[in-house]
Image (tube, rainbow, N blue to C red):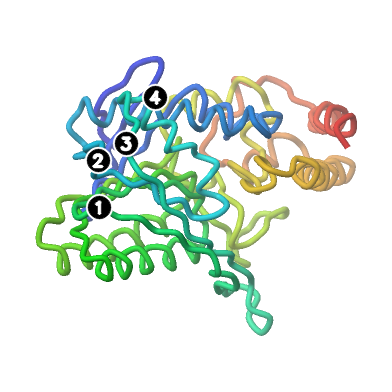
Amino acid sequence: MEKIDVSPDCGLYRMTTGKKIEEIIATTPETRAISNNPRVMGLEYTHCLQKACTKILQKLSGNNLTCLEETQTIVFDILRGGLNFGLREALGNAFGWNRHGCSFISAQRARKDDSPEQWHIVETEYSKVYMPKIASIVIGDVVATGTSLEHAMQALVAEAEKQGTQLRSVVFFTIGGPRAGEILGKMDAMCRNRFSGYEKTTLVYLEGCFTVPVPETKIRIKITGTDLLRLNAVMAPEFIASQYEDPCYPIQRCAIYDAGSRAFWPPEYIEDLYDYWSKVKDLADQGVTYEALLQERYPGLDPEPFGSVDLERVCDDQLSWIKKML
C-alpha cells in the first residue's frame, strides 16, 4: 500500500494491484468501531457507516479521486445491504447536495442445494432504476463471494444501455474481500468498451481487503463464503493498531458478521454472536489458549502487547453482555 492522505478522522491508502481500477483502503474511527466492536449495531451501526462514508467522499474528492457532479450522480442501492451505507445522505452531507438520485435493485443470494460452496441469485423481483443522460454511480455493499455484486453490475450496465445513458464512473464502498476487485475490474473493462465517455472505477475497501474462508481454510470456527477474516488480509495500519484496544477484537469471527441483521434485525445478529462466542468458550474449556486462537485467526499480529490473556475470561465477558441482549 502507499499513503494517499492520512488524518485522525480519515486515512486513504492506495493498493498497488496492477489493475486499471483504483483500489483504496480507507480507515476511520467509525469503521474501525464497526469491524472491531460487535456491540455497534442497529441505528448506531448504520449511522457510523454513513458518517464514515461522508468523510471518505470528502477526502476522495479533495484528492481528485472521483469525478462526481450533483445532477449526474446516482446512488445504486443493492437491497438490502446497500442501505447500510447511507450513501444518499453521505453525499448530501459531504457536498451539500440535494438533487442527486437514488435507484434500487434487489439481489438475494443463496447456496446451491447440490453444491453448497456455490451461490446463486434467488430473488431479483424489485427494480427501480433512474439514470440521467450522463451518470456517475455510487454504490455500497458487503462483498464475500460477490454473487450479488456481479448480478447488480450486469443489471446496471444493461439498464444504462436500455435508457441510453453514458456511464461516466463508479465509486464502490465495501466491507469485503478480493472478489470485489475482480468483479469491478471486469465491469470497468466492459464499461470502457461500451461507453465512450467512461473515465474510472474507484473501489474503496473499509479498513481492509479481508479474506473469505473456503472448506480448506484451517480455522476451526468459520462460515465459508460469508465470513470476512483478518487472516492474510491487507489492512490499514490504523486498523491493525486498533486490534490492541481489546483482546476480543482480533479473534472476532468476522469483520462484519451479517450486515443485514446487524442493521435491521438485531435479535438475529445477537444470536449469531452468542453462537460464535459459545463455540470459542468450548475451545477454551478444551484447553485452547488465547495465543493459540490468535495464531489461528490472525497469525501476523504480535501477541506480546496483550500480555497474559485468559481466553475463558474473554469469552465470559462477551457472553455476559450478549446474554443480556437476548
Tell me the tag on residue 71. 2
Tell me the tag on residue 93. 4
Residue 127 percent coordinates (x, y): 48, 63
First of labels 1, 3 by sequence position? 3
Q: Type of residue at label 4?
A: Asn
**Spatial CA span between label 1 and label 4:** 22 Å
Instruction: In this rendered view, identify the residue nearer to me: 294 or 241.
Output: 241
Q: Quadrant of residue 213?
A: bottom right
Q: In which quadrant is the N terminus drawn?
A: top left
Residue 170 percent coordinates (x, y): 28, 50
**Spatial CA span between label 1 and label 2:** 8 Å
Q: Type of residue at label 1?
A: Pro
Q: Type of residue at label 3?
A: Arg
Circles 1 and 2, Cβ within 8 Å, touching? The answer is: yes
- Find disc 1 in the rendering and name its residue: 132
First of labels 4, 2 by sequence position? 2
16 displayed left or right of 256? left
Instruction: In this rendered view, identify the residue nearer to me: 182 or 110.
Output: 110
Q: Type of residue at label 2?
A: Thr
First of labels 1, 4 by sequence position? 4
Judging from the image, what secondary structure is the residue with disc 4 in? helix
Is 89 above or below relative to 183? Answer: above
Tell me the tag on residue 99. 3
Circles 2 and 3, Cβ within 8 Å, touching? The answer is: yes
Q: Quadrant of residue 150?
A: bottom left
